[in-house]
Image: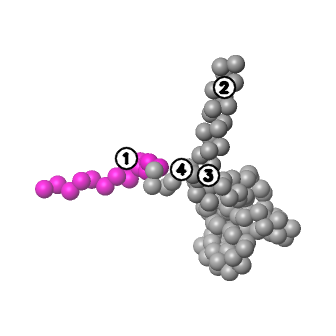
């Protein structure tokens, strides 16, 4: 019985904390992977322009882009955008997500190989 009370207490606290979250954290988005063939620099610029020109109700954010045998985009989009674009674009849905990234770029360590470190100036 004591475990059930603890669980209920934890659930109450967790549910109570939902009201403290920012609207962004409670808004559901969908993370997708999209691959586009072409010259990476050109594809990146053209795709940025396309995303910027989308209507406001179709929120699409380029989370990251990588060069591979094509240009691989990670996109975060609203549900209306996902519904509309899934019928015209061939992308892979990764998962429904809430809130911002848990790993901010500023909090990630930058790893540098020893041969890429500049020698400190000698005085």
Q: Answer whether labels 3 and 1 touch (C-beta < 8 Å).
A: no
Q: Main secondary structure of the magenta part?
A: loop
Q: Is residue 90 left or right of residue 69?
A: right
Residue 32 drawn above or below residue 58: above
The secondary element bearing badge 3 is classed as: loop
Q: Which residue is mark 3?
A: 19
Q: Which residue is mark 4?
A: 103
Q: Is residue 41 left or right of residue 36?
A: left
Q: Residue at x 60, y 39 (%)?
A: 13
- N-terminal of the pair, mark 4 or mark 1, is 4
- Gap in angstroms between the C-alphas marked 4 and 2: 33 Å
Name the foreground residue: 95 vs 119.
95
How would you rate the neighbour count of disc 4 (Cα within 10 Å): few for under 14, some for 14-19, many for 20 or more?
few
Name the foreground residue: 21 vs 114.
21
Which residues lie in the magenta part?
Answer: 108-123
Name the foreground residue: 87 vs 23.
23
Assign the N terminus to one quadrant of the image. Answer: top right
- Gap in angstroms between the C-alphas marked 4 and 1: 25 Å
Q: Is residue 91 left or right of residue 75?
A: right
- N-terminal of the pair, mark 2 or mark 1, is 2
- Gap in angstroms between the C-alphas marked 3 and 1: 47 Å
Q: Which residue is mark 1?
A: 114
Q: Residue at x 45, y 50 (%)?
A: 107
Whole-percent x and y of residue 42?
63, 76
């Amino acid at each position: 019985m004591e475990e059930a009370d603890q669980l209920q207490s934890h659930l109450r606290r967790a549910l109570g904390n939902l009201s403290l979250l920012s609207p962004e954290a409670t808004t559901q988005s969908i993370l997708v992977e999209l691959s586009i063939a072409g010259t990476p620099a050109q594809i990146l610029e053209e795709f940025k322009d396309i995303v910027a020109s989308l209507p406001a109700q179709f929120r699409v954010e380029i989370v990251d882009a990588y060069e591979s045998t094509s240009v691989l985009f990670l996109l975060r989009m609203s549900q209306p955008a996902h519904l509309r674009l899934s019928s015209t674009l061939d992308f892979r849905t990764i998962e429904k997500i809430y809130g911002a990234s848990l790993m901010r770029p500023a909090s990630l360590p930058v790893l540098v190989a020893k041969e890429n470190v500049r020698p400190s100036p000698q005085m």
